[in-house]
Image: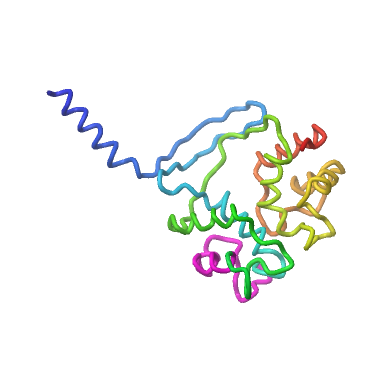
């Protein structure tokens, strides 16, 4: 009988806590191709979307470019380079503009529309409550780095908004394999993302993560496999 009571009590405690955020500190150590420092990750059952690593880069790439809604241009007095700025605009307004196909849309033509996956992620973030959830990456998977699986998502999130076939910022196009390979093998891309003597990129945004930079470096060292 006592065992049954203890079991019920334990289940009750678990039930009451399962929706709360849990803070976990995990030491990564110095293993090859993993992040090189300890990180703290906030894990929450309900709030699965991270603002700093998933939402802000998308908005920065498509909406907060120079001449639009960056901290300097502030078109229509909108600065979408931060959580506060996006919330000030209104997250429902953001969704409206990125999903419209006619009239006033974001990003404006000739820039490419956000892809369906990016739009759906922003919608999901808004549905969750559009929280300023900060996440740090704890592992870095650099096994078998390919353009299709590892590099394309990085470019789509951070670079394609400014460097695409319809809007070649700096006369650089990064929305296809051939141009991306050229920029990488010449050293121009890595020089920019590591801020080692070239114009720092992403322009107006934060640096790529150690993991993303490492993936591009490894991809380059293997002659940019598709």
| 203 w.r.t. 136: above or below | below
Instruction: Please state which of residues 159 and 135 is positioned toward the viewer in this rendering.
Output: 159
Q: Which residue, as the protein is rendered here, is positioned at the far left?
A: 1
x, y percent for residue 51 = 53, 53
Instruction: Please state which of residues 201 and 6 is positioned toward the viewer in this rendering.
Output: 6
Helix, strand or loop: magenta stretch = helix
x, y percent for residue 32 = 67, 27
x, y percent for residue 90 = 50, 68
Instruction: Please state which of residues 24 and 63 is positioned toward the viewer in this rendering.
Output: 63
| 66 w.r.t. 31: above or below | below
Residue at 71 percent across and 49 percent down: it is 155
Residue at 20 percent across and 32 percent down: it is 8
| 128 w.r.t. 32: above or below | below
| 100 w.r.t. 209: above or below | below
Q: How is the image coloured?
A: rainbow
Q: Quadrant of the C terminus?
A: top right
Q: Which residues are magenta?
A: 71-98
Q: Is residue 80 left or right of residue 126?
A: right
Q: Quadrant of the N terminus?
A: top left
Q: Is residue 95 magenta?
A: yes
């Amino acid at each position: 009988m006592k065992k049954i009571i203890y079991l019920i009590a334990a289940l009750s405690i678990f039930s009451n806590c399962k929706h709360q955020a849990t803070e976990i500190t995990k030491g990564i150590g110095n293993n090859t191709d993993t992040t090189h420092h300890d990180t703290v990750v906030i894990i929450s059952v309900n709030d699965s979307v991270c603002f700093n690593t998933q939402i802000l880069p998308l908005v920065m790439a498509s909406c907060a470019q120079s001449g639009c809604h960056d901290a300097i241009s502030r078109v229509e007095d909108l600065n979408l380079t931060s959580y506060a700025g996006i919330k000030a605009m209104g997250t429902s307004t953001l969704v409206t503009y990125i999903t419209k196909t006619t009239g006033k849309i974001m990003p404006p033509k000739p820039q490419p529309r956000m892809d369906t996956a990016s739009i759906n992620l922003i919608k999901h973030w808004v549905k969750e409550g559009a929280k300023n959830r900060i996440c740090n990456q704890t592992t870095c998977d650099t096994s078998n780095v390919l353009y299709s699986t590892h590099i394309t998502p990085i470019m789509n999130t951070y670079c394609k908004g400014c460097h695409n076939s319809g809007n070649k910022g700096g006369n650089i196009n990064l929305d296809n394999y051939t141009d991306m390979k050229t920029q990488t093998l010449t050293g121009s891309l890595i020089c920019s993302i590591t801020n080692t003597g070239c114009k720092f990129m992403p322009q107006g945004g934060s640096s790529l993560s150690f993991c993303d930079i490492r993936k591009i470096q490894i991809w380059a060292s293997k002659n940019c496999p598709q």
